Image (cartoon, rainbow, N blue to C red):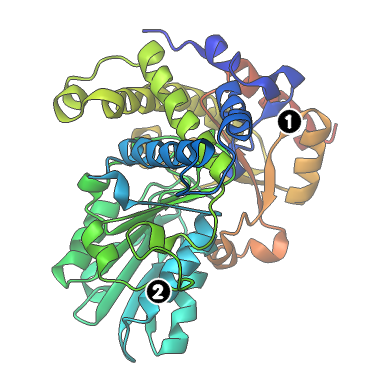
Amino acid sequence: MEYPVENIRAQFPALASGAIFFDGPGGTQVPQAVIDAVAAYYREANANEHGPFATSQRSDALIAGARQAVGDFINAREAGEIVFGANMTTLTMHLARTLGKTLRPGDEIVVTRLDHDANVAPWLHLREAGAVVRWLEIDPADCTLKLDGLDKIINQKTRIVAVGLASNAFGTINDAPRIAAAAKKYGALTFVDAVHYAPHRAIDVQLLDCDFLACSPYKFYGPHSGVLYGRREALERLQPYKVRPALDSIPDCFETGTKNHENIAGIAAAVDFLSWLGEIAGTPDPGAVARYSGRRALLAQALAAIQAHETRLFSRLLAGLLAIAGLRVYGITDPGRFAWRTPTACFTLSGLAPAEVAAKLAAAGICVWEGNYYAWEPMKFLELEAKGGAVRAGLALYNTSSEVDHFLEELNRIAHGA
């Protein structure tokens, strides 16, 4: 089945501006269905939870439906394992603080040098409780994790292992199942940051065998919010910080204060949008059909179609980048290893600061990011932080080959001083 990119683009009002949005790793555009769902909440269900009147009951039903939608998106066993919050960073800080109460001096936490700081700093704060932090380092040649010494880093003292499913800076996909298996060997908990991975590949927390996973709906075509999955057995072991009258039941006890109900409506709509994409663009996958059913199967088909489309575009993008004199791409560049990377390119251009390159592209109507994108540790490790970081261009499901070609034309002009 041919990927219906023009049909897909027609769902996104922002694309009518003519701008080229290669800023997806920092947040994607949203389809009209998400905008409509947020607006409809205000019209039809605007009330707090657990009241006896109609608008409150509609809010309750909407939130329950959204939990199920996200549960299908990541293949959770039950909707009650889904926690909503302001954003991934806030949820991770909250969870880390809660887990900190279970630690003793000398307990070890493993983090990686590759991650967004939202999956590093919250765990570093637990050194205040006497925890010892150990690092999984990266290979500067291709910006992948060095896993050969995994058994030496994770040991009987390890209590928490925090790893990103994909690097938001370089697109590297990590072998999270292998890391989770090493943690489980010693009874340690595994936390997975799936923020950058979620728009590009299907997530299955059962296959990952992780205890916690966080992602950001605004990176997969939804509103600015955060989502945390917690395996019920892991959540039940914890006593989160909360106000006293708040419900003690899971997952409510992990959701501090009133939730952003209108955004939760948008999250459900974003998942439904991807389900629709699975219907119109997904090629039936016997493996997915055998493993999943209903909305979950459609989501798996949608993400498979997205991956194929984005990989085609990224091959074109990367070939063009590598042909520009003075341009250096960071991360995996071997097409034979694209299964281990997302369609996100991080690069520098000789003689120009990343901010200059991004500004020149912006003037041409092309949106890209520059700097460290909160991937502070790897940017320092690669000695890029002091030089203004790097330029980042990321592809999304609505991007086209003509956009890639126009981007490369403009970048070539910039490289040649035009």
x, y percentage for residue 97?
A: 44, 75
> Label for residue 56?
none
Q: Is residue 351 visible?
A: no
Front in this rendered view, residue 254 or 300: 254
Point out which mark residue 366 bears: 1
Q: Residue at coordinates 51% horizontally, 25% vertically from top-left?
A: 397
Could you tell me the amino acid type at mark 1? Ile
Q: Which mark is residue 98?
A: 2
Q: Is residue 334 left or right of residue 76?
A: right
On screen, 332 above or below 366? below
Task: Tell me where residue 67 sits by quadrant.
Answer: top left
Question: Residue, x 17% and y 20% (percent of image)?
Answer: 286
- Of the 4 image quadrants, the one containing the N terminus is top left
Residue 35 seen in the figure = yes
Residue type, mark 2 in image: Thr
Q: Earlier in the sequence, mark 1 or mark 2?
A: 2
Residue placed most toward the observer, 54 or 344: 54
Callout 1: few (<14), some (14-19), or many (20+) C-alpha neighbours within 10 Å?
A: many
Q: Secondary structure at mark 2?
A: helix
Residue 268 on image: x %, y %: 46, 34
Percent position (x, y) of residue 162? 37, 65
Q: How many marks?
A: 2
* Distance (Cα) linking label 1 and label 2: 42 Å
Extreme residue toward the front, this view: 52
Q: Quadrant of residue 299?
A: top left
The kind of secondary structure element at disc 1 is: strand
Q: Say which of 168 and 350 sits in front.
A: 168
Q: Quadrant of residue 416?
A: top right
The residue at the point 46 percent across, 63 percent down is 92
Local crowd size for mark 2, using a 10 Å CA cut-off: few (<14), some (14–19), many (≥20): some
Indicate the position of residue 195 as horizontal and vertical percent values. Answer: 47, 48
| Nearer the camera: disc 1 or disc 2 | 2
